[in-house]
Amino acid sequence: MKIVLFGATGMIGQGALREVLADPAIARVVSVVRAPTATRDPKLHEIVQTDFLDLSAIEAALAGADACLFCLGTSSVGLSEAQYARVTYDYTLAAARTLSRLNPGMTFVYVSAVGADSSENGRVMWARVRGRTENDLFRLPFRRVYAVRPAMIRPLHGIRARVAYIDRVYRVLAPVLPLLQRLVPAYVTSTEELARAMLALAKHGGTARVVEARDIARLAAQAG
């Protein structure tokens, strides 16, 4: 199985990269990143891409993929709607449109967020943009498209958030996150569990195209 991964330098993407490289069912991983990583693996092909609105130069590497795990994203803090939408919507749809043309039989798994506004009309800017992104992904001619909506994510295996203030929050909460994950699994997942849930969707599909936070643990158990 060939997987395309976007965003492997972020917290969620680091978790996804770790799991896809460890999965014996995955023979090839094409990782498209904004900056090089230190990860080395025989089945990893890492591509540093500066323009996420035009992927024409790397189409040959993207062709023949069975699934895409799209983890690229940014925080909305301090951004205008146009700035946030450029990364969250424009980059995502540019990649998805390219992939749907090259690999219409593939599965596209998009990491969204709990609270995404499918109506696109709510008062919360980031939720509207996330909802619009989901809706337009569902219209593309893939075999399957899923939007996964995690809530709080517990970083494992030395993974850290790239955004400084988010990293500080997780460091403060680190002692209580394991307990919260056991007590309220509908609201707290881990980078490992989220990645395994995405892999399960890529490999086996799912019953609902929108995967809420409460369903992530159940899906993760099906990843093998």
Image (cartoon, grey):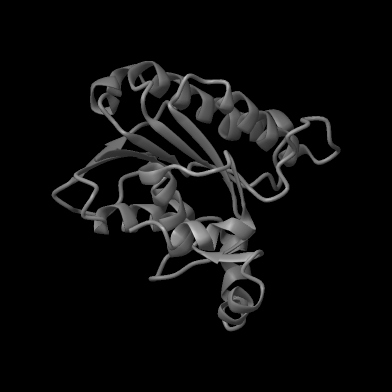
Q: Is residue 189 above or below residue 79?
A: below
Residue 190 location (% of width, % of height): 51, 66
**Residue at 48% across / 22% down in the picture?**
94
Locate residue 111, reporting x and y percent.
Answer: 53, 45
Residue 127, given in percent of the width and then of the height, sits at 73, 40
The total of numbered circles placed on residues is: 0
Residue at position x 81%, y 41% from top? 124
Q: Is residue 15 left or right of residue 43?
A: right
Q: Relative to 23, say whether 28 is above or below.
A: above
| Apparent side of residue 40 relative to residue 123 in the rendered image (left or right) | left
Against 15, residue 144 (above or below) is above
Query: Residue lying farthest front?
Result: 207
From what the image shows, is residue 114 above or below residue 121? below
In this rendered view, identify the residue nearer to me: 64 or 16. 64
Instruction: Name the residue furthest left.
Output: 42
Q: Quadrant of the N terminus?
A: top left
Q: Residue at x 41, y 21 (%)?
A: 100
Which image quarter: residue 187?
bottom right
- Residue 106: percent from left, percent from top: 37, 29
Dividing the picture into quadrants, the one containing residue 52 is: top left
- Regarding residue 1, the answer to whether it shows in the image is yes
Q: Quadrant of the C terminus?
A: bottom left
Q: Nearer the viewer, residue 167 or 96?
A: 96
Horizontal arrangement in the rendering, residue 22 relative to residue 5 (left or right): left
* Residue drawn at the location 39% of the way across and 16% of the way down: 101
Whether residue 10 is visible to the viewer of this picture, yes or no, is no
Question: Please, which residue is most extreme toward the right here?
Answer: 123
